[in-house]
């Protein structure tokens, strides 16, 4: 395991300087919308929180972390703060997979199509789509989280945004639960699948749906995607470890210990693969870590977009 203080300090420094935990320029990080016809006008904002966009960089960085975990070189990470962010941005873009970037950008495009097909009126403003800061909260750096959360919440409030449509569990929990508590600013928050209104019938397919911790345990939203899929003719395998009893994918531990993340991920894959059905996730972190742990996993949006 890496020294927690070093990891937290590095991530917090990146968030302070660039607005995201990897020190990336948003112009190079957030490009999925460029070929779309989304409108920038409206008080309801599609708010990705940049989580899907960050996953290709998480995957690339983790490969290097794995090499140095529990070695004398592990603490060298502390010097990452001294590297100019322009160099960091260039390096991470070089080592991250173009295929991964395309894949995760496609997921966001699919989500936008699902909302449009469902008749949902929403805007997308890239300059307002910010990282929520949730990882800082998860790792215990409450002071840095609150400072960043206040910046993001005030920016959205000043722009006249009243409602946020979220696409991942981490961002959803941050803006729905943590922001009102720590910033005093509240928004109406719904996930894209709560708003999805799709019609059609599937091919009586059965899938195994992995509930992310935040959706299953804390936000109590597990029944929403299940009911949505059932109405489309897709049935979900019943698992004992789902809903409020769901098991973690291991992904949130990657920054501290890639070994632990992989161990937890493999355990979860064994639970999900017990009946041999297709595994479907609705979280970018879960998707990446379950895939890394040896499973074939689709994103929920990839399944829903077939009914658009």
Image (tube, grey):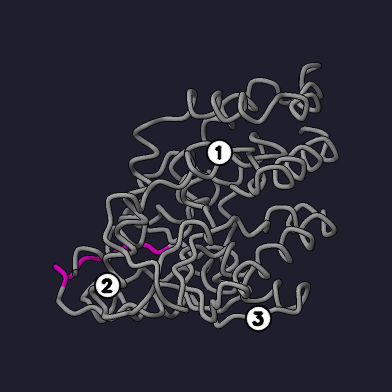
Residue situated in front as seen by the camera: 30 or 258? 30
Q: Position of residue 289 (x, y in %)?
A: 51, 44
Q: Secondary structure at mark 3?
A: loop
- Residue 5, placed above or below residue 168: above
Residue at figure coordinates x 26%, y 61% from the top left: 37
Q: Is residue 176 left or right of residue 146?
A: left
Q: Is residue 276 magenta?
A: no
Residue at figure coordinates x 63%, y 66% from the top left: 155
Q: Is residue 206 magenta?
A: yes
Sequence-first tag of 3 and 2: 2
Sequence-first tag of 3 and 1: 1
> Which residue corresponds to mark 3?
186
Q: Is residue 38 left or right of residue 89?
A: left
Distance of label 3 from label 2 (alpha carbons): 25 Å
Quadrant of the snapshot with the N terminus: top right
Tell me if mark 3 has few (under 14), some (14-19) or many (20+) residues whose alpha carbon lies within 10 angstroms of its own: some
Can residue 225 be seen from the camera position used here?
A: no
Q: Position of residue 52 (x, y in %)?
A: 47, 51
Can residue 16 be seen from the camera position used here?
A: yes
Sequence-first tag of 1 and 2: 1
Tell me if mark 2 has few (under 14), some (14-19) or many (20+) residues whose alpha carbon lies within 10 angstroms of its own: some
Residue at figure coordinates x 27%, y 50% from the top left: 35
Q: Is residue 1 left or right of residue 210?
A: right
For the record, the magenta segment spans 202-209
Q: Position of residue 231 (x, y in %)?
A: 25, 81
Q: Position of residue 16 (x, y in %)?
A: 74, 47
Q: Secondary structure at mark 1?
A: helix
Query: What label does residue 116 carry, if any?
Result: 2
Tell me if mark 1 has few (under 14), some (14-19) or many (20+) residues whose alpha carbon lies within 10 angstroms of its own: some
Query: What label does residue 58 carry, if any?
Result: 1
């Amino acid at each position: 395991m890496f020294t927690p203080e070093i990891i937290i300090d590095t991530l917090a420094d990146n968030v302070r300087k660039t607005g995201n935990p990897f020190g990336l320029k948003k112009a190079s990080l957030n490009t999925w919308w460029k070929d779309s016809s989304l409108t920038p006008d409206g008080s309801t904002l599609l708010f990705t929180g940049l989580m899907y966009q960050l996953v290709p960089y998480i995957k690339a960085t983790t490969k290097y972390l794995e090499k140095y975990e529990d070695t004398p070189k592990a603490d060298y990470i502390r010097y990452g703060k001294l590297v100019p962010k322009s160099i960091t941005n260039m390096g991470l873009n070089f080592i991250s997979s173009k295929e991964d970037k395309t894949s995760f950008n496609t997921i966001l495009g699919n989500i936008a199509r699902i909302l449009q097909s469902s008749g949902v009126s929403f805007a997308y403003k890239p300059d307002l789509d910010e990282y929520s800061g949730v990882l800082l909260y998860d790792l215990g750096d409450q002071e840095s989280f609150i400072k960043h959360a206040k910046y993001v919440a005030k920016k959205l409030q000043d722009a006249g945004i009243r409602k946020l449509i979220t696409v991942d569990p981490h961002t959803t929990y941050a803006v729905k639960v943590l922001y009102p508590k720590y910033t005093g600013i509240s928004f109406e928050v719904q996930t894209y699948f709560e708003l999805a209104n799709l019609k059609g019938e599937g091919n009586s397919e059965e899938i195994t749906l992995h509930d992310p911790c935040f959706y299953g345990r804390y936000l109590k939203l597990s029944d929403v995607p299940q009911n949505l899929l059932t109405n489309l003719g897709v049935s979900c395998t019943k698992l004992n470890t789902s809903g409020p009893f769901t098991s973690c994918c291991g992904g949130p531990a990657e920054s501290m210990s890639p070994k632990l993340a992989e161990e937890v991920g493999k355990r979860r894959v064994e639970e999900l693969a017990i009946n041999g059905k297709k595994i479907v996730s609705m979280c970018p972190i879960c998707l990446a870590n379950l895939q890394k742990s040896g499973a074939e996993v689709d994103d929920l949006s990839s399944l829903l977009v077939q009914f658009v």
